[in-house]
Amino acid sequence: MDGSWTLEPSEAERVEVCLPKPVEPTWTPERVAQLTVLWQEGVTTAEIGRRIGVSKNAVIGKVHRIGLVPRVIKELPAPHRNVFEFTGPACMWPIGHPTDADFHFCGERPIAGKPYCERHVALAYLKPKEKPEAA
Ligand SMILES: [Zn+2]
């Protein structure tokens, strides 16, 4: 090293800009603890990074490295909607049996205040305890 090659200040600056910035943040024990807590709270990686002051990728990398358990995204099964409580814009009269593959709801426009269309309201209230099979 005899300094045979030196860079002009302008060149040095350019080179420095081209250098990849250090991607590895300083994971202090505090940050790791914070990361762990936020992770377990279900905070998104981007949000964790924002709070700790590191990049989202750094958060993801660290999570893998320290072996945090992947969070289960809360994907609850579709609630078994009680058709009698449904007040949406479609007639919820069941067509067929719920176990059938082609089971579906009527879908006609319901009467205001009723879960069924005019035709099915008539059916629904005809025999409350012994409903006829849907056509
Ligand atoms: Zn209907």
Image: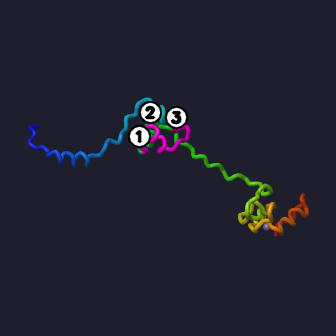
Q: Tell me, yes or no, whether the highlighted magenta stretch contains residue 72.
A: no
Instruction: Name the front one of labels 1 and 3.
Output: 1
Quadrant where the C terminus sits is: bottom right
Between residue 13 and residue 124, name the one nearer to us: 13
Which label was assigned to residue 54?
1
- For the residue marked with disc 3, what is the amino acid? Val
Task: Tell me what residue is drawn at x 45 percent, y 41 percent.
Answer: 50
SS at mark 1 in the image:
loop
Q: Is residue 39 left or right of residue 119?
A: left
Between residue 13 and residue 76, name the one nearer to us: 13
* Residue under label 3: 37
Q: Is residue 59 left or right of residue 19?
A: right
* Residue under label 2: 31
Magenta segment:
36-56
- For the residue marked with disc 1, what is the amino acid? Val
Labels 1 and 2 touching (C-beta < 8 A)? yes
The image shows residue 11 at horizontal and vertical percentages of: 17, 48
Mark 3 Cα-neighbour bin, 10 Å: few <14, some 14–19, many ≥20: few
Q: Quadrant of residue 41?
A: top right
Quadrant where the N terminus sits is: top left
Q: Mark 3 or 2 closer to N-term? A: 2
The relative height of residue 83 versus residue 30 in the rendered view (above or below) is: below
Q: Main secondary structure of the magenta part?
A: helix
Is the CB atom of the residue marked by disc 1 within 8 angstroms of ligand 1's nearest atom? no
Is the CB atom of the residue marked by disc 2 within 8 angstroms of ligand 1's nearest atom? no
* C-alpha distance separating marks 1 and 2: 9 Å
The relative height of residue 118 versus residue 33 in the rendered view (above or below) is: below
Ligand 1 positioned in quadrant: bottom right
* C-alpha distance separating marks 1 and 3: 15 Å
Q: Is residue 127 left or right of residue 23?
A: right
The relative height of residue 51 versus residue 113 in the rendered view (above or below) is: above
Q: Mark 1 or 2 closer to N-term? A: 2
